[in-house]
Image (cartoon, rainbow, N blue to C red):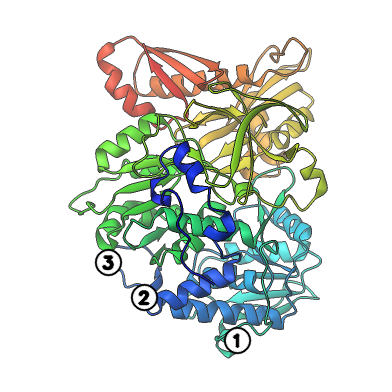
Amino acid sequence: MSTQPAQQGPLATELHDMKAIEGFESLPLAERYPWTNTYDLIINACQKWGEDTALEFLPTAEKDEASLPISYLQLAGRMNQTANLLHGLGVRAKDAVSIMLPTLPQTFYCIWGAQAAGVTSPLNPLLEAHHLAEIIGVTGSKVLITMAPAHGNRELWDKAVAVAQQANDLTHMVVITVPGLTEELPEAPRDGITMVDFTALIDQQNAAELDSKRVFHADDPAAYMHTGGTTGRPKVAQLNHGHFAFIAQLTDDMTKNRPRTPTPCALPMFHIFGLVATGIAAFVSGRNVVIMSPTGFRNPNVVQNFWAHVDRFKFQGIAAVPTILSVLYEVPIGDNDISSLDEIVSGAAPLPDHLKINFEKRFDCWVRNGYGMTESSCVLSHSQRDTAVPMGSCGLRVPYAERIVAHVDGNRLVKICEANEAGVVLSRGPNIFAGYLEQEDNDKAWVDGWFNTGDMGYEDENGFLFLTGRAKDLIIRGGHNIDPVLIEEPLLAHPDVSAAVAVGQPDPHAGELPMAFVVATPSRDIDVDALLAYAAENISERAAIPKRIHVIEEIPLTAVAKIFKPKLREMATEHALSALLTEADIEAEVSASTDQLKGLQAQVVLAKKDQQADTEALLQSFPVHIDFS
């Protein structure tokens, strides 16, 4: 098999307009990108890059701490050994392996080794135990990989125990022990579970090849990914080997003109952005993935020392989310040399225009905004380094992946929108997932063969996509999805509440925070503090507990008596902006509105014009279009 993409039409590094993308697509996909599975891709990369460093682990992310390097050949060996260990436990090609780990070198071995033995299913350890057990139940996983109790911190292990006690079908727990950092192999959480010491057994496995002699196909399931996080019931998306292989080869092809500089890994590996950007795509390009401590950006050392790490490793590119960029913006550069830093790839949430502009100006780099989701194998829309992207756009569509903006009625396509006409974003192509594991989740996901993203937006006359809001009522807090029903149902059960609607209130750090509007039951008064305490006790997910509850006389309705959430989001926006301005002693009038093409926007009228610069700086991270008058 050829390891080099065929050449026809423009190069992948030259896809700056739709004409170039269409010319690029004149060569059939199978000829341009022949690899069809993650195992062969990674093994080929490991053979190609040999003794070069694949992973470099910083245990604490302190400045200049000694790192643990792992070569590409060692990565291949560990991946094979992990796959063979799992195969010996009975894992076969269609069997899920649940993985609940912080970001360690072993996490990479387990994610890709599980994908070589069966199907990998990374879990977010921050979710509640009962949701994790539900996900394991949906995937049918019988094996859970986790970490032994850490000295002084048993939180992850205690969560794993709670999960195992609720996930009745689990038969094995594969536990990673680290001398000096963790305790020895614990006892099983319940009868029926066999404990397996990963660290003690891994060196005994065959490192040269797969004992299973497995032959991979593009439509073999590769990963079961739960979507986002905090929802009333987990949805699990199936991504196949062909999906990962396509995105990895395309990403490598689009960065052929870039040097093989190290890549920081500070995003969680249970999220599709981290899994692709700092996983398989980095390996195919032969980069050194620097693991920025087990907890990544949640570790204060990573943030406080970030520019020192850029200086040390000469990072040229960074994958991050807008909330992280807003935090890094406030970290002084000091005497660190960050001249190597050239571009930031931002994803997982809308990127505020002011934050992009100011970040680029302060750090002399280019911030490019992308758009994707689990169901699109990470990416639906992108912009390249030298593409002239209009402000506010998340770029052009991915080659070979069709995209339209349309009006829909349920699962029926009513009309394809013209340029600059808003509708729902639909897509199909080699990056679009194989569907959800439970059929009821698929019922609303497809429109005449197109995947319905649930996002609203429009394309301009040049094919650039602008997102304007969501058709689906999700609150996105720090990249995690919250179903409003999870908040509304417990509130409606309170005797003082006759109506409750939860929406996302814009927040400069989390993107959105959950809040609720409530109407009092006739002849009753609502004690807001007591209701907040009630919500904290009765809402099953901590991340979904509303930060604010606002009592109103009536819920705004449409002409056909449906709840009009845009009005409530406008009210939440006005409150959030006004509260922050008041705290900063800035006198202003704030009004919010919803525009068909711009989405949610706010107008800020300042009492003192000389405060505009300070106000712009204060509000730069708000995910709302802000107009100063």
Work out whether residue 357 or residue 326 is closer to the camera in this orientation and state it: 357
Question: What residue is at 25 percent from the left and 39 percent from the top?
Answer: 362
Q: Is residue 473 left or right of residue 54?
A: right
Q: Position of residue 216 (x, y in %)?
A: 66, 71
Work out whether residue 4 or residue 268 is closer to the camera in this orientation and state it: 4
Q: In the rendered image, which quarter is residue 148 located in?
A: bottom right
Q: Compute the Cα span from label 1 to label 2.
A: 26 Å
Q: Earlier in the sequence, mark 1 or mark 3?
A: 3
Marker disc for residue 64: 3
Q: Is residue 77 left or right of residue 299?
A: right
Q: Position of residue 10 (x, y in %)?
A: 42, 48
Task: Say if residue 106 shows up in the picture.
Answer: no
Disc 1 marks which residue? 201
Q: Earlier in the sequence, mark 3 or mark 2?
A: 2
Task: Bin the neighbour count of mark 1 within 10 Å (Cα to Cα): few under 14, some 14-19, many 20 and up.
Answer: few
Disc 2 marks which residue? 52
| Amino acid found under the numbered disc labelled 3 | Asp
Q: Earlier in the sequence, mark 1 or mark 2?
A: 2
